[in-house]
Image (cartoon, rainbow, N blue to C red):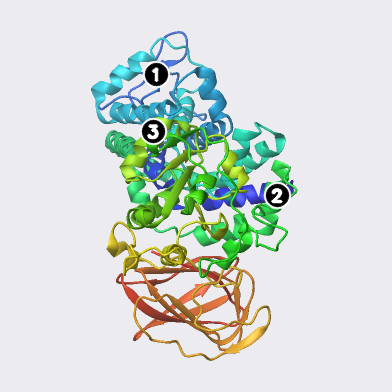
Amino acid sequence: MLTLIAVGVVAGLVTGLSPCVLPVLPGILAASSLAPARGRVPAGPGGSARAPAPADGPALAFEPVDAPVRTSGPDGSPPTSGPDRRRPYLIILGLLTSFTALTLLGTVLVTALGIDEGWLRTAGLVALVVVGLGLLVPAVGHRLEALFWRIPQRGPARDGSAFLFGITFGVAFVPCAGPVLAAITVLAATQGLTAGLLVLTLSFAAGLAVPLLLIAAFGAQLGRRLSHRMPLVRRVAGAVLVATGIAMALGLSDAAQRAVPGYVAAVQRSVEDSDAARAALDSLSGDATPAGAAGQTANGALSFDECARLGAQALADCGPAPELTGITGWLNTPGDQPISLADLRADGRVVLVDFWTYSCINCQRTLPYLTAWDAAYRDRGLTIVGVHSPEFAFERERGNVAQRARDFGVEYPIALDNDFATWRAFDQRYWPAKYLIDRAGQVRMVHYGEGAYAETEELIRALLADGGADLPAEPAGPGDPAANEAQTPETYLGYDRARGYTHSITRDAPAEYSAEAPFGRGGQDRVTLRGTWTVRDERIDAGPGAGLILDFSAARVFLVLGGEGSVRVVEGDQTNIVEVTGAPTLYEVRSGPAGRSRIGLYLDEGLSAYAFTFG
């Protein structure tokens, strides 16, 4: 149980630091900076105070005008005019309460209420905009206050106001899902609420609360500093809330998140995909078989996890593909009729199965590649099947999936896996995940997460060529050809998922490397080790004279590093020193013009390097 709690907390913390929380941060910052409006006057014998709406704007949307307030502090001093110090905690508590309730009980709630599964999120976004308008436009705020005039009050109204703000944010909050949040979502949908699942979810929420609370506390501090300009602060906060709600409703926030690199992906994978995390998550589902073991056969085929560790460097034998099972509906097939892998195998098709969910930013980033491959190779023998396994209740609605598929330009078949039957058949843990299947029905490649696009396309072309397909001379690349060169994919350095080394490596023992970094033709992403290194399963440990040469295409380079020491980064005639301290975390080692480049990194002995990510 302690391992489960630790995994949940760390996974929540990493999620709270990821780009997926960016859409709600401006709203949290703005809402935390607010203070109750001035102008309240003492009431009569009842001893409470009534607050006519002041000329400079409404009190606070959802905060009734007859709320009891203190006319002095506990020691008789005038009350503070800045935000209550409890306000950040109440906002984040409200956000996590609604997020947790909807994650665990979303499907049950919408079924009991008999409403469309997308309406809850829509209602949350509408409430966000209405509250913002109430702060931005005094006349609207006065109307909103009037709605609460006759509601009896129990305790400080601003406490309830802050909590309701958080509830609204939580309904609209759609974080990215790693294996931990994926496990919570799937188990809640398939097994219902259990004690272990509740512990994991609360642990995840506790970790998620830490970075969000820091943002909220900063907003409150900002509000206290600007308390003498509170009418202006209210209007600015209102504008931020309106803009946030509209941006999320129109999907503009998704575009912004897609533009931000997944800078915590390597850390998230190292935590949530560790052996301890897998064992803890498997214990919740009562699965005696290690996660990802689907595909193992008596003839010695690799498991799906083993194939994923090999990367997309070459075709492998990953065992027979499980059938698409328990699908609740289809999109983009003739008459929306079901198809099966058996039928596709009989037709001699190469199949790429892609597990996705439409609000997942990581999934959205892969779609330009998938749609480009579909356009280039559908008539040459490739069928892409997008298995849509919903992370949130509103993603179960067929109309929502169909609309977002049109928005993304997805024309290949989509299987609606609302009951997670196919997800479980493939022993899935990730959004997104890809399984490349040959004409005989054997899985030949498994890839979890983003990246490895060029390598995946080469394997697709290899399987199509085996069947005699007439292939175009050049790879299709993504829908935007410039994007194919725009960024090097995530590059792991440990031998479990290593890619791009220009030389052979020695496992689990110190070795001296002296290979020259090749120049060759452009367009290659490569890593060349120099000096003494010990290459382990998930990391490489620096010995005397340790260095490496990295060829990449990106503007920014990040590296997960651990230990105590410094890294000297050399690019041309420029040198930068990165100080490293403590547990493994992400460091930016290069920021410069986008495009293909080469840097050298020279690490102090004792430091460990895990994976590069790019932006």
Q: Which mark is residue 335?
A: 3
**Crowding at label 1, few (<14), some or many (≥20) Cα neighbours within 10 Å?**
many
| Residue 208 place in picture, x, y as percent | 54, 45
**Crowding at label 3, few (<14), some or many (≥20) Cα neighbours within 10 Å?**
few
Mark 2, secondary structure of its residue: helix
Residue shown at 33%/45% (left/top)? 408
Q: Nearer the viewer, mark 1 or mark 2?
A: 2
Amino acid at the residue labelled 2: Ala
Q: Nearer the viewer, mark 3 or mark 2?
A: 3
Amino acid at the residue labelled 3: Gly
**Crowding at label 2, few (<14), some or many (≥20) Cα neighbours within 10 Å?**
many
Badge 3 vs badge 2, beta-carbon distance below 8 Å: no
Mark 3, secondary structure of its residue: helix
Whether residue 95 can be seen here: yes
Label 1, label 2: how far apart the Cα atoms are: 47 Å
Residue shown at 56%/54% (left/top)? 441
- Left or right position of 530 against 26: right
Q: Which mark is residue 280?
A: 2
The residue indicated by pointer 1 is 64
Q: Nearer the viewer, residue 342 or 611?
A: 342
Label 3, label 2: how far apart the Cα atoms are: 43 Å
- Left or right position of 166 against 555: right
Q: Earlier in the sequence, mark 3 or mark 1?
A: 1
Q: Earlier in the sequence, mark 3 or mark 2?
A: 2
Residue shown at 45%/36% (left/top)? 330
Q: Quadrant of residue 506?
A: bottom right
Amino acid at the residue labelled 1: Pro
Badge 1 vs badge 2, beta-carbon distance below 8 Å: no
Whether residue 432 can be seen here: no
- Left or right position of 348 against 309: left
Q: Quadrant of residue 276?
A: bottom right
